[in-house]
Amino acid sequence: MIASTRHRSRLRVRLSSQCGSAVAAVIVSAIAAAGCTTANEVAEAEPNATIAATTPVVATSEALSAEPTVAATTPAPATTETLPATIEVVVATPPPTPPPTEAPTTVAPPATVPPVVETRQLGTSVEGRPITAVRRGTPGGRVVLIVGVIHGDENAGLAIIDLLEQYEVPAGVDLWLVDSMNPDGVANNDRHNANQVDLNRNFPADWGPIGVPGDGQYAGPSVASEPETQAMIAFITEIRPDLVMWYHQDLFRISPGKGRDGAIRQRYADLVGLPVVSITGGIYTGVAATWARRTIDPGVAFIVELGATLTPEEADRHARAVLTIAAEPN
Ligand SMILES: [Zn+2]
């Protein structure tokens, strides 16, 4: 519930995307015109991509985080001055037991599983907001890192992180959760960080200059110039995850991969019902997942493109799929 409370103010699921619409042709042309291509490291053409129809908006994660509301157990003030003395004895008895409907919900982890092993500040954003990682599960196990947001106006992944901060982590999984590596972008509902840099073009993976400040894919003045990028580079280099995932919106797909990487992508896609389709149309230098994949080799790093919206049921499916692939031998 702590996490849920912390995120609630940020769980604004967009009704529409800067990068998308329900019509594929509009999206493709918008991408080309605005340079607002959803970040992906796979540069393969897919001009006829079908975009999933929008689904009902997720309001908040509260329905899934369902923490029991504590019923008022204090009896109403007794108007003792008008009551017989025997009533005062009744008031002094222990408060009534809460009704059965107030019993703890199933989201509470068992006592044997610490809800959080560690919380670490990885760095600070341009505007001074902390970039925070929460560690759960089994230290020393298979290291898995999930990043909810890198593009600030693509924040549906926050709902998935919220659930992952509550669900029981399978044994043997050393799970790290970064709700947003771009907290300024989330606060400002902006794809970029506060320096107007597209953080997913700023990583040291074939980095090259793209655009000028404010452009959709502005890559920054130099490689890894941004504090958010530097924080993630230091963190991933240290923990060396075997699996890293970044959530984006709103192309509703996962790009195909090869070998072990491709098999895990396909498995995740099957679990959540996303098509495995290439993503194209942008300049894909300086991409975080590409840098991570090279750094953690033979580890796996990939992007999940959610739709324009994410229902609570979909968020639940994604969170459970993360835990499934994290625990599977592969
Ligand atoms: Zn994106």
Image (cartoon, grey):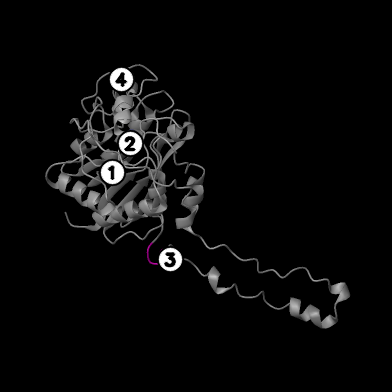
Q: According to the image, label 1 marks what residue?
A: 245
Q: Give amino acid for label 1.
A: Met
How far apart are the alpha carbons under marks 4 and 3?
48 Å
Secondary structure found at label 3 = loop
Residue at position x 46%, y 51% in the image: 61
Q: Is residue 111 magenta?
A: yes
Label 3 neighbour load within 10 Å: few <14, some 14-19, many 20+: few
**Is label 4's Cβ within 8 Å of ligand 1?**
no
| Residue type of the residue flagged with mark 2 | Met
N-term mark: 2 or 3: 3
On screen, 180 above or below 198? below
| Residues under numbered marks 4 and 3 in contact, where contact means CB atoms less than 8 Å apart | no
Residue at the image point whose x is 84% and y is 73% from the top: 80
What is the magenta range? 109-113
Coordinates of residue 79 in the picture (x, y in percent): 83, 71
Say which label, 3 or 1, has the lower sequence index.
3
- The residue that disc 4 covers is 222
Q: Nearer the viewer, mark 1 or mark 2?
A: 1
Q: Which mark is residue 232?
A: 2
Separation of marks 2 and 3 at Cα, in angstroms: 33 Å
